[in-house]
Structures are given as structure tokens and as C-alpha cells.
Amino acid sequence: MKILIASDIHGSAYWAGRLMEAIEREQPDRIAILGDVLYHGPRNDLPRDYDPKRVIPLMNGLAQTGSLIAVRGNCEAEVDQMVLDFPCMSDYAVIVDDAGRELFLTHGHIFGAGFHNSVDNLPALPEGSAIVYGHTHVKVNEEVPGKPGIWAFNPGSVSIPKDGSHSFGIYESGKPLAEAFTHVVLEEA
């Protein structure tokens, strides 16, 4: 099972378009969106080509594939659910891969592993699981300190990176946790 993981698009039509190109290239089995899809939020500068109305049809096109799963970020509002054709208001979702590994998907503002200002509120997860979150706009791919057997993965931010590079992530089942997640940098066209 191959899952493409993206977070923090923040209404950037340019970077959403680059993400759509990456999805076409990667051909994932599932797509996980970790929140903050349409709005930039009051603490962020406007991202490149900020145009939430242009992002809506791109995201709704993904919903038509039946492979999209999304969670709510701290910038989502009820009006977002009115324009998006997929559920996006849950604080978390769980994917169990074909090998039985649990991936706990969340944004990072309610549940998190404590990295880079994400909340330190890790739910009870079985050993060999992963918490997959966004919110901080900083890439993470390592074991949770003090929680042996629990992995943390943050794909970084599609449009407003705070670590220097626009990115998303790929998860491939059947590999050890340390090798199952990778970051992919989105280059400017």
C-alpha cells in the first residue's frame, strides 16, 4: 500500500497544482490530507498564488477517486465542509495498512508527538504504529522520544514551509517504520 501524505496547502493554487502533478506521478493507493487546506490563517503570510476558490475544484477532483482521507486542521471552518466534497472536519482518522500497521492521522494541534511546537498529546497507540501529523510546517521522520515502537511523521508543508522546502510524504507498507516514510520535496516550476 502506497499513501501520499500532504498537509498545510493553505489555499495556494500554485502549490496545490504542484501537489496534483506529484499525485499523478506517484500514483498512490490512498491520499491523506492532514488539514489546513483552504485558508492561510492569521499567523501566516499569504502563500504564493493564494486563491482558495481555485484549490476547491482540485481537492474535489481527488475526492472523486475514492482514495482521499482528510482531517481537520486549525484553519478549517464549517464553511469549508460546505464547499469540499469529502469529509474534512474530524480531528483524526486511522488507516490500517495491508500489513496491519496503524497510522493515526491528525493535524497536530489537538494530538501530537511534541515536536516543533506540536502538542504533546499522543493517543494510546499499539507498538509499531505511527502518528502522522502536520501543523508545524516542519518535516519529522523519527521515533517518538520516550515512546519506543511509536513513529512520528510530519510531511512538512505543501505551501508555507518553515524548514526551507515545500514537501509532502510517501508511506509504503511492508517496510520497517524507519524506512516506510519518506519526504518528497516539491520544486518550483
Image (tube, rainbow, N blue to C red):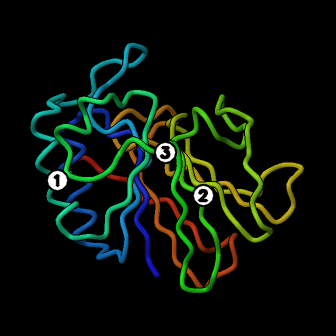
Residue type at mark 1 is Asn
Residue type at mark 3 is Gly
Foreground pick, 1 / 87: 87
**Between marks 2 and 3, how big is the CA–CA gap?**
16 Å
Q: Taking 84 as reference, is 76 left or right?
A: right
**Which residue does the numbered mark 1 point to in the structure image?**
60
Q: Could you tell me how many numbered marks the image carries?
A: 3
**Which residue does the numbered mark 2 point to in the structure image?**
104
Residue type at mark 2 is Phe
Q: Taking 144 as reference, is 47 left or right?
A: left
Disc 3 secondary structure class: loop
Give the residue drawn at x 26%, y 54%.
19
Disc 2 secondary structure class: strand
Expressed as whole percent of the image width and height from the top left, the position of residue 117 reads 66, 28
**Between marks 2 and 1, how big is the CA–CA gap?**
23 Å
**Between marks 1 and 3, how big is the CA–CA gap?**
22 Å
Earlier in the chain: of badge 1 and badge 3, it is 1
Q: Taking 162 as reference, is 145 left or right?
A: right
In the picture shown, does residue 127 fall above or below 147? below
Q: Quadrant of residue 158?
A: top left
Foreground pick, 162 / 134: 134
**Which residue does the numbered mark 3 point to in the structure image?**
156
Disc 1 secondary structure class: helix
Q: Nearer the viewer, mark 2 or mark 3?
A: 2
Expressed as whole percent of the image width and height from the top left, the position of residue 27 reads 29, 76
Foreground pick, 189 / 78: 78
Earlier in the chain: of badge 2 and badge 3, it is 2
- Badge 3: residue crowd in 10 Å (few <14, some 14–19, many ≥20): many
